[in-house]
Image (cartoon, rainbow, N blue to C red):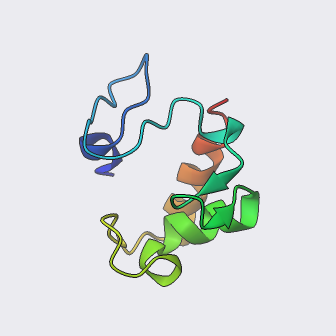
């Protein structure tokens, strides 16, 4: 996916500088600039369709398959 174009995860090829650094994503209490609690359901919903949670946010909805969305969330949950 194109996540790496905008997001940084230190120590990986993801070196984007436009969007938030996701290196320690799971240590955060909230997502979407503090709009929602950082938990599995909200993270999954956010990755699936950020515009439904925060209309006009800069993160687009990518139309991910369920499988791809679950893979991304599984990876993001390792970022502590």
Compared to 52, does 69 lie above or below? above
Which residue is rendered at x = 27% and y = 36% of the image? Answer: 16
Compared to 67, does 72 lie above or below? above
Which residue is rendered at x = 50% and y = 59% of the image? Answer: 68
Compared to 75, does 31 lie above or below? below
Query: Is 65 or 38 nearer to us in this picture?
Result: 38
Residue 73, percent from left and from top: 60, 52
Which image quarter holds the C terminus? Answer: top right
Residue 37 position by quadrant: bottom right
Residue 36, percent from left and from top: 66, 66
Residue 45 position by quadrant: bottom right
Query: Is 50 or 44 nearer to us in this picture?
Result: 50
Residue 42 position by quadrant: bottom right
Residue 5, percent from left and from top: 24, 43
Residue 55, percent from left and from top: 40, 82
Which residue is rendered at x = 60% and y = 59% of the image? Answer: 70
């Amino acid at each position: 996916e194109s996540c790496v174009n905008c997001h940084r995860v230190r120590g990986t090829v993801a070196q984007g500088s436009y969007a938030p650094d996701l290196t320690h994503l799971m240590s955060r209490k909230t997502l979407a600039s503090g709009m929602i609690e950082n938990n599995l359901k909200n993270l999954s919903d956010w990755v699936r369709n950020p515009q439904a949670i925060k209309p006009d946010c800069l993160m687009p909805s990518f139309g991910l398959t369920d499988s791809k969305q679950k893979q991304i969330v599984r990876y993001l949950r390792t970022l502590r």
